[in-house]
Each structure stands twice: as structure tokens, then as C-alpha cells.
Amino acid sequence: MRPAETDRSTSVSPVVRRFARVPIDALVLLLTGVPRAADYAFNISEGGLCVDTAAPLGPGTLTDARIALPRAPGPLDVMVRVAWSEEDSMGLQFLAPAPSFIELVRRALHRRQ
């Protein structure tokens, strides 16, 4: 179970998210300074994204990310913080994204809803 999700078998209410998430299939390259394979985002919001990965980074790790959103004019660069990580996935929070970056994410969100 991802940290932001709730076990539905308990009486605990689900966590209310700040931003709506939508499914996406986007290539994500983390620019950590060491060679690593590209990851794939499986959902995105204005606040961040979740990626499938064979090599998750530890929570709190700061790095730059290059994201290839569908129909974007080119890859988008943004600083991210690893919010949580598991064996095969992690959540990345966007840090101080440029307004133009957020606008492109919003467009991707509206196309998917």
C-alpha cells in the first residue's frame, strides 16, 4: 500500500488529496548524476507523479527530472523530491515548478479526464 492510500479493509477514512490524479503513460528520466534507466509515470497531478521503477530512490531525495508528457512540445524539466518509495515504485513531488510547466501538466490532465 502506498503511503497516501488507505487500507479499505479498515475503518480509517481515505486521505484527501490536494490535487486530482489522472492515469498517464509518460517517460521520466531522473537526472541524478549517475547513469540510470528511464522510469515510467503511471499517474500525474499538479503536485507530482508516481513512477514504476526498478531502482527507487530514498524518501527525501532531491533530483531533477525530465518528463516526456504526451503531446507536449518537448521534454519538461522540473526539480522533484521523493515523497515515498517502495520496491518497484515511488512518488515524486514537484518542487517550485515554473508556471509554464504547471500549464502543460494541466493540459495533460484535462485531456485525460
Image (spheres, helix red, strand yellow):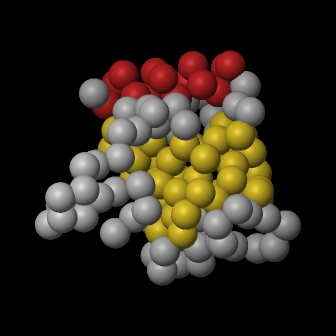
Residue 108, percent across and down? 44, 28
Residue nearest the viewer, comparing 8 with 73? 8
Query: x, y percentage for residue 49?
Result: 50, 48
In terms of image quadrants, where is residue 2? bottom left
Report the side of 43 relative to 106 (left or right). Answer: left
User: Would residue 68 appear left or right of 5 to someone viewing this image?
Assistant: right
54 lies left or right of 110: right
* Residue furthest left as drawn: 9
Give the quarter of the figure containing the N terminus.
Answer: bottom left
Q: Is residue 93 above or below residue 17?
A: below
Instruction: Check the picture and name the quadrant holding the C terminus.
Output: top left
109 or 90: nearer the eye? 90
Query: Is residue 89 in view from this perspective?
Result: yes
Residue 65 in view here: no
As drawn, which residue projects farthest toward the front?
11
In the displayed structure, would residue 67 be above or below residue 1?
above
Q: Nearer the viewer, residue 6 or 113?
A: 6
- Identify the residue at image location x=59%, y=77%: 55
What residue sits 54% from the left and 69% below the top?
85
Residue sitting at x 34%, y 57%: 5
The percent position of residue 22, horizontal first and vertical second, equals: 34, 38
